[in-house]
Amino acid sequence: MRLFWKFFCSMVLITTLSCSIGGFWLINQQFHIALQRETTAVFEESDMLCYAIGSEAENYPAISWEELGNMAGDILVQTSRGEVDFRLSDKQGQRVGARGSLPEAATGLVTSLSENERGWQIVTTEAGRIYLHAATPIALENGGLFLENGRDVTEIYQTRTEQYRRFTYLMLGMVLVLGVLIYLLTYFLLKPLKRLSAATRQMASGTSLDVRVPVDREDELGDLSRDFNTMAEQLEHQVQELKDAGQRQEDFIASFAHEIKTPLTSIIGYADLLQSRPFTPEQLQSYVNYIFSEGQRLERLSRKLMDLIVLKKQEFQLRPMRMDVFLGRVGGALSPTLAKAGIGLTVRAERETAPMEPDLLETMCLNLIDNARKALSQVEKGEILVEGYREQESWVIRVTDNGRGIPPEELARVTEAFYMVDKSRARAQGGAGLGLALCQRIAALHGGTLQVESAVGRGTRVTIRWKGEATNEASH
């Protein structure tokens, strides 16, 4: 059975039982009060008769029971109901005397009482009348007698029966009305549960996780709706985190493929030079050293890109590095590729020692130079200027080109992951839209900032600025 019908039937049953028990109890209470009132009136009549009979007996001390019985017929007690009928009986229930007539069924009460005990009983005649029959002891010098009298209480019982009948009809009508009202109330109370059930099925189907239920009440069901919405928000957040984790994995693959292109390009470029013509031993040793150093950097870079992109590691060991040596190595790695493309490269760097993570910072610089190279692909006499110097308390690396530039409306988005100003050109040149986004993260890792300035048709300048103390020690 569904909860709606359980709730509906339970409320109807409980309400019906409560009203029925309460109604029948009230009817019985009224009946007992009326019966008690009649009992009191019967015993009051008995007391008046006992007093009258006792007074007569005092006038004749030696009167016999037979004479007393004959005298009883002359005793008259009048009430609002008329003349009171009674009889005198001994302890064995034998009649001594009487006035009027009592129902023949009213017997056996005297024999059940002690000499000084009064009592009453309900008797029913053959005609179906109901009588309240009472017996009261009378103390006399020559022994004790019992005075028996009664009242017709048929009307009290008939009234109770009529009240039962009317109340039953009333309850049937109330059950019908209550059924309609409780149905509407149950529907209203359980409406939030239906909304919750529908929302739960929608979420379970996987079609949408942003489903929410309206909260329009301040009771427990309202609290349940709010808790459901909170749970749905948490679930949506966790699912989004899983999607983000998957996206980071994809980002890593794309970034890794993008970043290893530069050292591989240097390795391939120097290897191509070695195959193209003979070189002096000094040149040969220089080119082999470049190939070896780029291979080592490629190995280190793969681990650090994993930490930076996938694991989101935020702490790397910075070590001192001479700016001129560092940028000279960066320029040397790309010299064959740039020379082959007819692009001039100028490196200006101070002989100052700056704190840096050289592998990641070299990746950033190579990215910026490679971006500049792509911007110069259709420009005659392309030039790239790489500068490194100290400015007050900050270190600055700046890459400037005279390429096609970036439109102003695109400038604010160039550091977003996967965003490309010229998508067709970027894809044709193997870009993934991750270069500047990665550069910005590397700059932030050094506690610095990345600033892009550009003018269409005049070129682009990218500046990386980070703080750090100058030192005399340097790694080469």
Image (spheres, helix red, strand yellow):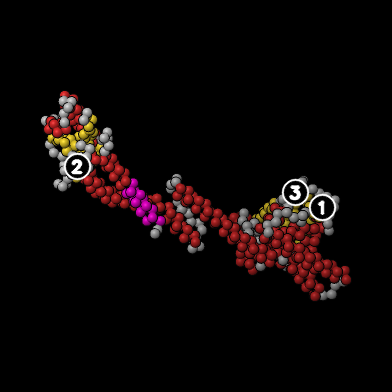
Mark 3 element type:
strand
Q: Position of residue 328 (x, y in %)?
A: 80, 60
Q: What amino acid is at disc 2?
A: Ala
Disc number for residue 107: none
Q: What amino acid is at disc 1?
A: Thr
Disc number for residue 353: 1
Q: Are marks 1 and 2 in contact (CB under 8 Å)?
A: no
Q: Position of residue 187 (x, y in %)?
A: 37, 52
Rendered image quadrant of residue 245? bottom right
Along the line of sight, the residue nearer the viewer: 79 or 458: 79
Q: Quadrant where the C terminus lies?
A: bottom right
Please rate how many residues cluster around mark 2, counting C-alpha atoms within 10 Å: few if below 14, some from 14 to 19, many from 20. many
First-in-chain label (2 vs 3): 2
Disc number for residue 106: 2
| Distance from Cα at disc 1 to Cα at disc 2 | 129 Å
Q: Quadrant where the N terminus lies?
A: bottom left
Q: Disc 1 or disc 2, which is closer to the eye?
A: 2
What is the span of residues highlighted in magenta in the rendered image?
A: 3-18
* Residue 68 drawn above or below residue 300: above
First-in-chain label (1 vs 3): 1
Residue drawn at (80%, 68%) of the image? 291
Q: What amino acid is at disc 3?
A: Lys
Disc number for residue 467: 3
Rendered image quadrant of residue 98? top left
* Left/right of residue 186 with respect to residue 223 in the rendered view: left
Residue drawn at (64%, 63%) of the image? 249
Q: Are marks 2 and 3 in contact (CB under 8 Å)?
A: no
| Distance from Cα at disc 2 to Cα at disc 3 | 119 Å
Mark 1 element type:
strand
Along the line of sight, the residue nearer the viewer: 399 or 52: 52
Can residue 443 be seen in this snapshot? no
* Residue 93 drawn above or below residue 324: above
